[in-house]
Image: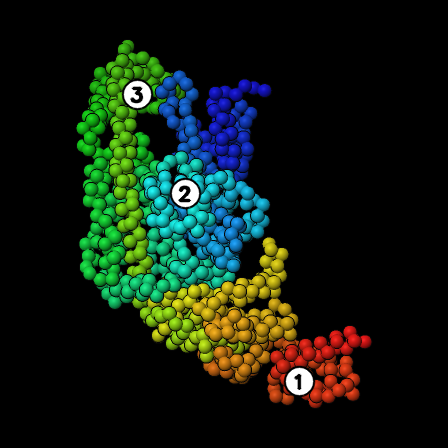
Amino acid sequence: MNELTPLMAQYQRIKKEHKDTILFFRLGDFYEMFGDDAKNGSKILDIALTSRQKVPMCGIPFHSSEKYISRLIKAGYKVAICEQMTEPGASKDIVERAVIRIITPGTVIEENILDAKKNNFLAAIFKESGKKSTVFGMAYADMSTGDFMAAEFNTGNALADLEAALSSLSIAEVLLPGSSESDKELVNLINRHHIPLNFYDDWLFVYDNAVTIIKENFNIKTLRGLGFEEVNSAAVSAAGSIINYLKDTQKKVLAHLLPPKLLKSSDHMILDEPTVKNLELVANLNDGSKQGSLLNVLDCTVTAPGARRLAHIILHPLRSAAEIKNRQDKITYFFKDSIKRIKLRELLKNIVDMERLLGRLNCGTSNARDLKSLSCSLNHVKEIKSYFNEPGCISELINCIGEFNNIVELIESAIVQEPPLTIKEGGIIRPEYDRELLKLHRLATGGKEWITELQEKERKRTGINSLKIGFTSVFGYYIEITKANFNQVPSDYTRKQTLVNCERFITPELKEQETLILGAEEKKNQLEYEIFQNVRSEIMKETRAIQETAKAVSELDLVAALAETAALNNYVKPEINDSSSIYIKEGRHPVVEKTPAEIKFVSNDTRLDSNENQILIITGPNMAGKSTYIRQTAIILLMAQLGSYVPAEKAVIGIADRIFTRIGTTDNIARGESTFMVEMTEVANILNNATFRSLLILDEVGRGTSTLDGISIAWATLEYLSGNSKFSEKGPRTLFATHYFELTDLASTVGRIKNFNFPVREWNDQIVFLRKLVPGSADKSYGIHVAKLAGLPAGVIDRAEEVLDNLQKNSYREDGKPKLAVHEAVSGQMSLFSQADPVMDKLLKLDPERMSPIEALNKLNELKTLLKNRKGAQ
C-alpha cells in the first residue's frame, strides 16, 4: 500500500472526525471531495469523478459552492466546510486546514438556498415518561433569523399535539436523544413528515446540562425570566440540546440567537395536520403549491420577514380577545388611511431582509454588499419612524424601531459605494477611511501608473510599438515582444518565457517595481479585510436592537398587508368576543370567490352556538356548495382570530380554541390504514379532544363503509356531540355535511340540531345549483345529473336512470322516505320468532318500514338480544 502524502494524511485525519458529513476540502480555488464523498457527490451534483493517488476525487469551485451545497442538503446530506487557515507558501509546512462550519438542513443560512418567505427551523424533541403522563418538550430555532422558541405538550393526547406542532412549523431537521431510536412511535411520526432526523448524545438532553448551557449562552442567572419553571424540564432539555448542536456545527458563539421563548398552548389555536390540509391554509390540495390557498389570497406583504410572519400567524391564530383586537386596531389604522398605507408599503419595499442579513453577519458569511444593504435599509427605517411618529395604535411598533445613525455613518464612511462580492481581494474599503490604507492604496495604484509609463518609455527606447507589459499570477509582470521584433530586443532584457508567437522578458527595474506593487497590494487587501472585520464587529454589537427593529418592521408589513387585502376584497372588521356564538352575514369563501368562474359567488349566512344552533346538518347534492360553505365558515373564523378583516357583510365571532375538520381522505399506505380507518381515526381524535369552544367541520362522516354502518356511526357521532356525553351542557359548534338524509330525523328529537340544505331546481331535464343555504333538509342527491355534467357516456347515464327507477320502486316507504337495509333486517329478525310467541305479540303489530332509522336500529338490537337469549336457554 502506498504511503499517504501529507495532504491526504491531513484529509484522512479531518474526515475521521466528520464521518457523517460530506467533507468539502479546500484546495486553492476548489472544494475537493474524496473517497465515498466523491462517489456520492459526483452523482448528486452531476460532476466528473477523477482520482488522486488512486482515491476517487471530484471538486467544485469554492466561489459557486452554494448551489452545490443546496443540492446535497436537499438530498439529505450534511456538508462540512474545511477551509485553509494559512496562506499557501507562508511556510514550508503543509497549509493548515480546519472545519469551520457544518451545514445541515436545519442550520442553513445561505440566502440563495433558503426560501425567503418561509422559516427554516431546527427542532429538538425530548420525551419525559416518568410523570403521570407522557410529556413532550420541543424547542425550535431558525439560525437564519435568530428566532428561538420552546413548548411542552402534556395533555392526554400529547403525541397528537406534537404532530400538530410539526405540521404548523417549517421544520427542516429534528434532533432526538440517541436512546429515542427505539421509540418507533415517535420516530415514525417524524419520518411520516419527511423531516431529516438526527440522533444526538443523550447527555446533551439532560436537564441540568441544558440549564447550564442556556444560562451561559445568554449570560443569565435564572430561566424564570424567560418564562420557564421547574415543571418545564422537557422543554428546557430540548432547548439546551439545540444550543449544543448549533455550537457543534457552527463552531462559534451564536450572538444573534435570541433567548428561547416558552409558548403556551393557551396562547394560540391548535391546528392539526388534517385541518391545515383540508382548509388549504398554506397550500392547495391539488399540487401542494401556494396557489389556491388562504395564504396566497392574504399575502400582500412586500418584505420577506412580513411574508414569513403572515405564514406563521395563519397556522397559529390567536385565542386572546385582547391580542386579536390589538392587531385589528393596527389593521384598521391602515385600512382607513390609504395614503399612509401606500406610503408605508413604498418605504418597506426598500428594506432588505434584516433578520437574515444579521444571521449571516453574526455567522461570518456576510460581505460588504450586505453592509451597504443594511445601511440603506436603516435609512428607510428611520424614515418610517419619522413619518409615523404619532400617538395611536401603531405607536407601540414605531417605538420599537431604533435609530442607528452611528451604524449608517460607519458603513457609509468605510465601505465603497459599489463593493465587490469578495471580501479578501480588496476594493471594499474607502482608501481615505484609514491613513495606512490610503498610503498603501497610493503605492499600489501609483505603481500601476509607473508600469504604464514604463511601457511607453520602452516602446520609444526600442522602437517596438507593439511592446506591452502584462501580468500573470504565476510569472508576475513581464515585457512581451512578438517574434517579428526579436532583432530589436535590448541587451538588458532577460528572457522569461517563450510562447508560440512571442517572447516574454523581464528587467531588474521591472522586478524591483513588481515587488513594491505586489507587496503594497497584498498589504492593502489584508488591511481592508481587517477593517471590514472591525466594521462588522461594531455592527454586531447592535444585533439585539436591530433585531427588535426588524421584528417591528415585519409586523408593520403584516398589518398593512392585511389592510390592503381587506380593501381590495371588500372585507369587514369582525366583532370578537368570548361567547360561543358565531354569526356571519353573507359570508364568502376568500379563495373560491377569487377563482375565475362564469357564475358569481353566492354568499351565505351562518348562525352557530353551543345551545340551540349547536349542530347544523347540511344536505344537498354534490356540487351544490356544501363543502365550500362549511370550509368558508371555518376560514372566516380563523381569519377573525388572526385579527384580519373577513369576507362578509357582518361577522360576530366567539373565539374558538381549536378547529377540527374531517373532510375526504385516502388510504394511508405508510401506516397500513384503509380509507375508512383513517376517517375513523380522525373522528376519534375530534371526539376525544374537542371542547364546547371548538369548531367542528365534518363532511360525509361514515361514507367509507356500508350504508348501514355509515348511518349508524354518523348518527351516534351526532348524538354524542349534541349532549348525550361529556358535552351534556354545551357542545362544540358543528357543521355536518352529509348525503345520509336519514340523519335529518335527529332535528325533530334533539333541540340543538338544525337542518339546512342547498336546494336545486330542475328544468328541462337539467338541474340548476342555487348555492343558497335554506332551512330544511334535501330529499334527493341528483347523483346521476352530476354524473352527466361530469361527462359520463350517454349509455351509462341512460342505464343508471333505468336502474335507479327500478330501485326506487322497491326502496321507498309509503311516506316517501328511503327504505333502508335496517328495515329489511328488522323484518328478517322478526320472521325467526313464532307468531304465537307472546313476546312477539306487540312487535308483530309494528311495520318496520314505517320506523325511523334510529327506531329500526334500536328494534333490531332488541330482537337480536331476544334471539340470543332464546338460543342460550335452549
Spot occupied by residue 478 in the image (x, y as percentages of width and height): 31, 19
Mark 2 vs mark 1: in front: 2
Instruction: Report the coloring of the rendering.
Output: rainbow
| Residue sitting at x 50%, y 72% | 727
Label 1–label 3 contact, CB within 8 A:
no
| Residue sitting at x 31%, y 62% | 327
* In this rendering, position of residue 665 left or right of residue 244: right
Spot occupied by residue 164 in the image (x, y as percentages of width and height): 48, 57
* In this rendering, position of residue 46 left or right of residue 302: right
Sequence order check, earlier mark of 2 and 3: 2
Sequence order check, earlier mark of 1 and 3: 3
**Residue 852 in view, yes or no:** yes
Residue in the foreground of this view, choosing between 89 and 503: 89
Which residue position is annotated with label 1? 849
Which residue position is annotated with label 3? 477
Spot occupied by residue 570 in the image (x, y as percentages of width and height): 33, 70
Mark 1 vs mark 3: in front: 1
Classify the position of the N terminus by image quarter. Answer: top right
- Which image quadrant for residue 425? top left
Secondary structure type for disc 1: helix
Secondary structure type for disc 2: helix
* In this rendering, position of residue 528 left or right of residue 131: left
Mark 1 neighbour density, 10 Å: few (under 14) some (14–19) many (20 or more): many
Mark 2 neighbour density, 10 Å: few (under 14) some (14–19) many (20 or more): some
Which residue position is annotated with label 2? 211
Mark 2 vs mark 3: in front: 2
